[in-house]
Amino acid sequence: MHHRPVHRPHTARLSPLEELEQSFLALARTATPLTMPAHLVCDGPSEEVWPVDQIRVRLAHPSTRPELRARTWSEVVRRAHELGEPWPVVAVAMTVPVLRRMLSRLARPAHLERQEVEQEALAAVAVALAGVDAGDPGWTGSCSRLRTARFTAWSTRLVVAGSGRRVSRWSSWGACVPAQPSRTWRA
């Protein structure tokens, strides 16, 4: 019996951040893109509404004033809570540029895959955003601190005494992560 090798094209597995990014961009780049009022992120916009990817770019731009960021975040979170899908995806995807920077700065133990770390970071953001009261004017001022605190808390929880595996408290889907890395993870 002769076996012929089956040619299977190499399919690169997308990371959780890449999958989220693709979903987000698909919402923004269709014939009828998902939009938000442009006045949320800039004064005197030339167009009334912008696709959500342009809103995110402007939201992350250093020249965007804090009150415009707060107003935009309040609207994104309000829509995520009140309108449902796809707005929770949009809310988490709005944090992708910041998450990429945060994750690139973390030393990752060799036994943790990038996908695990990204998955946990996204879960932490989703949990944090789900618990936010968009009607509370004080939450937006601490949004960055909330995100950083939640993620830092998660990353430091990875370094615990003991052996075996445990479920991260931040994970909404119960992804297991090793409880004892081979070296210290610095947040």
Image (tube, rainbow, N blue to C red):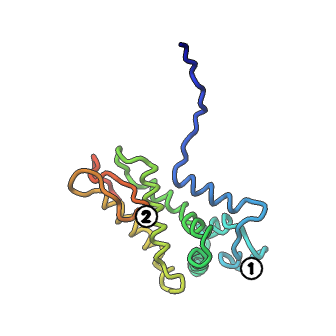
- Residue at the image position 29 percent from the left and 52 percent from the top: 165
Q: Quadrant of residue 65?
A: bottom right
Residue positioned most to the left:
162
> Residue 83 location in percent, x, y?
62, 76
User: Of tags 2 and 1, which is closer to the observer?
Assistant: 2
Along the viewing direction, whichever of 44 and 174 lies nearer the viewer: 174
Counting from the top left corner in percent of width and height, residue 46 is at 78, 74
20 sits to left or right of 130:
right
- Farthest residue, direction front: 1
The tag earlier along the polypeptide, 2 or 1, is 1
Residue 129 in the image: x percent, y percent? 49, 72
Q: Which residue is mark 1?
A: 44
* Viewport quadrant of the C terminus: bottom left
Say which element carries label 2. loop
Q: Quadrant of residue 106?
A: bottom left
Q: CA distance from mark 2 to mark 1?
A: 40 Å
Q: Is residue 52 above or below residue 112?
A: below
The structure residue drawn at horizontal position 42% and vertical position 52%, both measured from the top left corner, is: 116
Query: Which amino acid type is shown beneath numbered disc 1?
Result: Gly
Q: Residues within 10 Å of mark 1 (few under 14, many from 20)?
A: few
Compared across the picture, whether 143 is left or right of 69 comes to left
The residue at 46%/76% (across/down) is 131
Rendered location of residue 174, percent (x, y): 39, 59
Q: Residue 175 vs residue 129: left or right?
A: left
Amino acid type assigned to the residue bearing label 2 in the image: Ser
Disc 1, SS: loop
Residue where numbered disc 2 is placed: 172
